[in-house]
Amino acid sequence: SPVPGRRHTLPASEFRCLSPEDAISVFEIEREAFISVSGECPLHLEEVRHFLTLCPELSLGWFEGGRLVAFIIGSLWDQEKLSLDALTLHKPQGSTVHIHVLAVHRSDRQQGKGSILMWRYLQYLRCLPYVHRAVLMCEDFLVPFYQRSGFKVQGPSDVTVGLLTFIEMMHPVWGHAYMRRNSGV
């Protein structure tokens, strides 16, 4: 039985994979974060639901007091470079995680949460034996942010959205976990 005088409280901070039920919260944060900057959303609501249904294990949400404050959505890809198809397809046999979007709620920005979430996500990916690398495409001004997380510039992306052009970036994720699994330690 519960301890007298003690109320159930939500965890202060929780990281978990997202589900289709989180789609509306995800989309609201994404829309506010991207429309104001570029005028485009990486994923529309139906695409958010699509990826959270097909590959929820490749997403990560940060919740504080039960409220979504930041998230990443990824899917698997099976080619060296991203193409227009990579924006909407999940390739279950792929070994590359395409990070479609990382967004932080406006009231939680400028606190390092995007960097912390990316670090947690990359650590999580290292535990998935079928994932060898993570790739993303971003606008020029975001390159330093992703470089601080260990991503390397691969060059201009072949993908454009309207007048927007992107830089493709890559981060190997299998190295450390692979060495640990095979080191006998």
Image: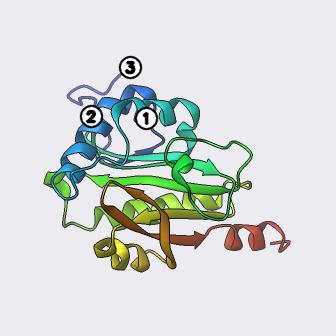
Q: Reading the chain from its start, which is encountered first: label 3 or label 1?
A: 3
Q: Quadrant of residue 31?
A: top left
Q: The disc labelled 3 sits on which kind of residue?
A: Ser
Q: Secondary structure at mark 1?
A: helix
- Front-lying residue, 170 or 185: 170
Q: Position of residue 148 (x, y in %)?
A: 40, 79
| SS at mark 3 in the image | loop
Question: In the image, what residue occupies the spot 23% across and 29% down?
Answer: 7
Q: Please state the horizontal and vertical placement of residue 59, each as a whole percent of the image.
A: 48, 45
Please give the label number shown on residue 56.
none
Occupied quadrant, residue 132? bottom right
Q: Which mark is residue 1?
A: 3
Residue carrying label 1: 47
User: x and y percent of residue 86 in the render?
Assistant: 55, 50
> Nearer the viewer's eye, disc 2 or disc 1?
1
Is residue 152 depicted above or below 65 in this figure?
below
Q: Within 10 Å of the Cα at label 1, are there few (<14), some (14-19), or many (20+) other Cα atoms?
A: some
Q: CA distance from mark 3 to mark 1?
A: 44 Å
- In screen coordinates, is 180 left or right of 36? right
Residue drawn at x 40%, y 67% is: 166
Q: Is residue 10 in view from this perspective? A: no
Q: Secondary structure at mark 2?
A: loop
Q: Earlier in the sequence, mark 3 or mark 2?
A: 3
Q: CA distance from mark 3 to mark 2?
A: 16 Å
Question: Where 40 sits versus 122, above or below?
Answer: above
Side (left or right) of 163 relative to 16: left
Of badges 3 and 1, the one in the foreground is 1
Q: Residue at x 77, y 74 (%)?
A: 179
Q: Relative to the observer, which residue lies in front, 126 or 161?
A: 161
The residue identified by callout 2 is 9
The one nearer the camera, 120 or 131, is: 131
